[in-house]
């Protein structure tokens, strides 16, 4: 009876064992890599806005405080998107006729708000409150990055749950003095390993990791 | 089948029946190595596929399609299509899960424990009982997955792996123990089944008429040549796998019972649950083996291989395990009274006289009363009757799970949250659909793989011949 397989079939059989392992491992690895990639999280993705508003210019060059526009950040869950009136405080005086700012003026004239596109969009099943984070000494920069260096704001972090938990499990790594919350490019004067635990104690920061802290 | 010439069946010289009758043989008389191999492999290789096979497969496949439609509707609409409600949040899905998992246990018991105890009668039924285990576990696993409503998210609910939420499953929950128990069970059962198939795959490869069949069975037989070294390693591997499977017979259904026993609900929170569930699993599993074996031996003329010895022994196992289950029922009733706990007592009164009392008494009638028939040899000799009774046992064990789950949930501690449960047509579509899946797989299995272990049957030929030759036996 002739042989069905050539001698080399043995090697192929053994290789296929290895191949199956690599394939399964590679596939799982690939899925996990895609899951945490910016393709899924949409981090570092520029988002077109109705006006080419530059945080780099307004925060970095002009030094306007975050709270001038985001007025409710210290008192409410939502930091607040400024009404057109806030823009017009200055732009009725400077660049008052710039064609570039026509959408702002028409919004003001017609009393129709500018439709800004949300950059940091948490899923609806997550409860997030800006005011408590600010109150406990979390800097804007910690989550949003160097806004003063962004011509167009982009989401710098993944906003995935593991990223939230990094801080919720060990807040002393990120906490800063309340006076420095709105500072961009903050460097702790004493090492964070010394300052962090002190501030956690002083501000009464709890490490809240119960499900219902965020998923209410 | 020729009239039995086996020495055990012979009457004494005077013609009266002996007071003691030896068990029927595990292999019909007159078989040689060649005839055993020929008869079993012919089903796969040479015999025309009978019309009955196509008919049976068509019906099973139609129900499989019903399952597909149901799952499609379920995923698009959500589990609201089922009758589940609050308080009965677990209903058909967990009833059917436990039912199917239980059925699988007979396969593992036959293949592992009976192997270690050197019970020869396991030989002709172990292959298809193991296949039954695999298919039953596949049907079972579907229910908890689909109960989540979004099975594509189930990976992180069920398996501990480093995910983007930094979240692990709740290791203190019996549901995660279930995941490990069932996936281990499936893996070990698959390995055991496949290891046992390898020498037979080689036989089929060598008997293949077409090149494509030779290549397919050649690949599946993993280069088996039947050398002494192969056999030595095979025996070692098979024995080791049997040793690994043996604890699973007890552990898997114990863990399944923890789903209930670890909770504090009256009717669930009972220490009898693990042994009672394991016995129930083996009981229902043997009933399913019987349900499959009777038509199989009839339609393919395998009475010489699946003999009355097998039928008798399976009936006896069902009798023993059924009695343990009946003891469990008595125990539940006794402890409900003995606990002096009004909730436990109400639970029992509600089972016996509440809205689901008909189902409770049906299950008592089947699992405690009907099985007493198995004491009688005339019943054990009547294959058709046993087939019908085994179907009843399947129904009875399904009712048991229904009673345990629904009666405990629908009226618990707080009367204000009481409610009734009724399944919808989609519940039944899903259940009958998994039966369709199970039978479709089984039909494919008996058509394309040797349903009886040929090489193990050949070892019986040897022993049968020797037994006849031994002096003093006749």
Image (tube, grey):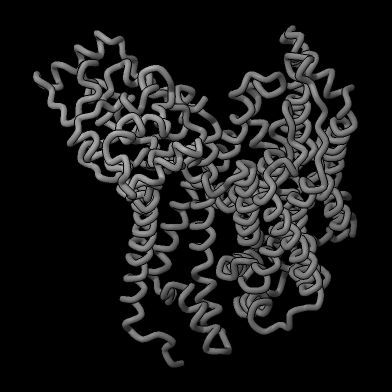
Q: Nearer the viewer, residue B368 or B348?
A: B348
Above/below status of B362 relative to A128? below
Q: Please identify the residue farthest to the bottom as the structure is shown.
A: A2
Above/below status of B309 relative to B42? above
Q: Please identify the residue farthest to the left as the structure is shown.
A: A190
Q: Nearer the viewer, residue B313 or A180?
A: A180
**Residue A92 located left or right of residue B102:** left
**Residue A132 located left or right of residue B439:** left
Residue at left 83%, top 43%? B374
Above/below status of B232 relative to B278? below
Q: Nearer the viewer, residue B82 or B202?
A: B82
Picture quadrant of residue A139 = top left
Picture quadrant of residue A21 = bottom left
Residue at left 45%, top 40%? A107
> Residue B323: x, y in percent?
76, 34
> Residue B335: x, y in percent?
73, 15
> Residue B171: x, y in percent?
46, 30
Residue at left 67%, top 20%? B265
- Tag count: 0
Q: Could one spot residue B307 in this view of the protein?
A: yes
> Residue B295: x, y in percent?
79, 63
Picture quadrant of residue B204 = bottom right
Q: Could one spot residue B312 in this view of the protein?
A: no
Above/below status of B194 relative to A212? below
Residue at left 39%, top 35%? A161
**Residue B284 located left or right of residue B213:** right
């Amino acid at each position: 009876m002739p042989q069905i397989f050539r001698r080399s079939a043995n090697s192929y059989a053994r290789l296929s064992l290895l191949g199956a392992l690599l394939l399964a491992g590679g596939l799982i690895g690939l899925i996990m890599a895609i899951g945490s990639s910016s393709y899924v999280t949409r981090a570092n993705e520029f988002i077109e806005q109705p006006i080419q508003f530059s945080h780099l210019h307004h925060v970095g060059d002009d030094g306007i405080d975050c709270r001038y526009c985001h007025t409710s950040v210290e008192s409410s869950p939502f930091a607040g998107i400024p009404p057109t009136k806030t823009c017009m405080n200055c732009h009725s005086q400077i660049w008052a006729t710039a064609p570039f700012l026509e959408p702002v003026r028409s919004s003001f004239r017609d009393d129709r708000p500018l439709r800004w596109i949300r950059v940091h969009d948490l899923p609806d099943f997550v409860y997030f409150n800006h005011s408590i984070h600010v109150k406990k000494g979390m800097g804007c920069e910690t989550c949003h990055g160097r806004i003063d260096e962004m011509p167009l704001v982009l989401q710098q972090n993944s906003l995935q749950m593991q990223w939230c938990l990094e801080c919720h499990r060990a807040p002393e790594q990120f906490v800063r003095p309340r006076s420095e919350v709105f500072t961009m490019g903050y460097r702790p004067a004493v090492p964070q390993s010394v300052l962090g635990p002190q501030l956690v104690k002083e501000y009464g920061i709890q490490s809240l990791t119960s499900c219902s802290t965020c998923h209410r | 089948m020729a009239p039995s010439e086996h020495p055990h069946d012979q009457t004494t010289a005077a013609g009266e029946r002996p007071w003691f009758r030896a068990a029927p043989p595990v292999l019909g008389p007159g078989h040689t190595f060649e005839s055993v191999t020929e008869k079993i492999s012919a089903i796969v290789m040479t015999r025309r596929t009978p019309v009955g096979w196509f008919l049976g497969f068509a019906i099973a496949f139609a129900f499989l399609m019903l399952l597909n439609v149901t799952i499609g509707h379920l995923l698009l609409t959500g589990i609201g299509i089922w009758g589940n409600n609050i308080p009965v949040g677990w209903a058909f899905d967990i009833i059917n899960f436990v039912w199917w998992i239980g059925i699988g246990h007979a396969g593992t018991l036959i293949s592992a424990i009976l192997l270690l105890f050197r019970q020869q009668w396991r030989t002709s039924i172990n292959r298809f009982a193991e296949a039954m285990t695999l298919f039953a576990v596949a049907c079972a696993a579907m229910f908890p997955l689909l109960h989540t409503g979004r099975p594509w998210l189930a990976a992180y609910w069920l398996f501990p792996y480093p995910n983007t939420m930094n979240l692990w499953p709740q290791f203190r929950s019996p549901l995660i123990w279930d995941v490990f128990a069932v996936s281990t069970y499936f893996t070990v059962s698959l390995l055991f089944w496949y290891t046992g198939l390898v020498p037979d795959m080689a036989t089929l490869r060598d008997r293949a008429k077409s090149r494509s069949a030779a290549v397919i069975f050649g690949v599946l037989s993993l280069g088996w040549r039947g050398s002494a070294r192969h056999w030595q390693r095979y025996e070692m591997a098979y024995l080791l796998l049997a040793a690994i499977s043996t604890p699973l017979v007890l552990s898997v259904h114990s863990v399944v019972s923890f789903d209930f026993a670890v909770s504090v609900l009256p009717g669930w929170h009972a220490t009898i649950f693990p042994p009672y569930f394991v016995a129930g699993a083996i009981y229902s599993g043997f009933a399913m083996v019987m349900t499959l074996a009777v038509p199989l031996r009839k339609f393919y003329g395998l009475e010489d291989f699946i003999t009355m010895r097998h039928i008798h022994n399976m009936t006896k196992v069902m009798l023993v395990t059924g009695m343990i289950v009946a003891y469990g029922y008595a125990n539940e009733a006794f402890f409900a009274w003995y606990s002096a706990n009004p909730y436990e007592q109400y639970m029992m009164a509600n089972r016996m006289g509440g809205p689901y009392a008909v189902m409770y008494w049906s299950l008592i009638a089947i699992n405690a009363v009907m099985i007493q028939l198995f004491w009688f040899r005339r019943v054990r000799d009547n294959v058709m009757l046993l087939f019908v009774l085994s179907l009843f046992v399947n129904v009875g064990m399904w009712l048991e799970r229904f009673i345990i789950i629904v009666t405990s949930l629908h009226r618990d501690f707080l009367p204000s949250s009481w409610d009734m449960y009724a399944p919808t047509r989609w519940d039944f579509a899903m259940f009958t659909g998994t039966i369709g899946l199970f039978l479709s797989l089984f039909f494919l299995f008996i058509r394309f793989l040797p349903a009886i272990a040929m090489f193990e049957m050949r070892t019986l030929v040897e022993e049968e011949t020797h037994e006849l030759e031994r002096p003093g036996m006749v």
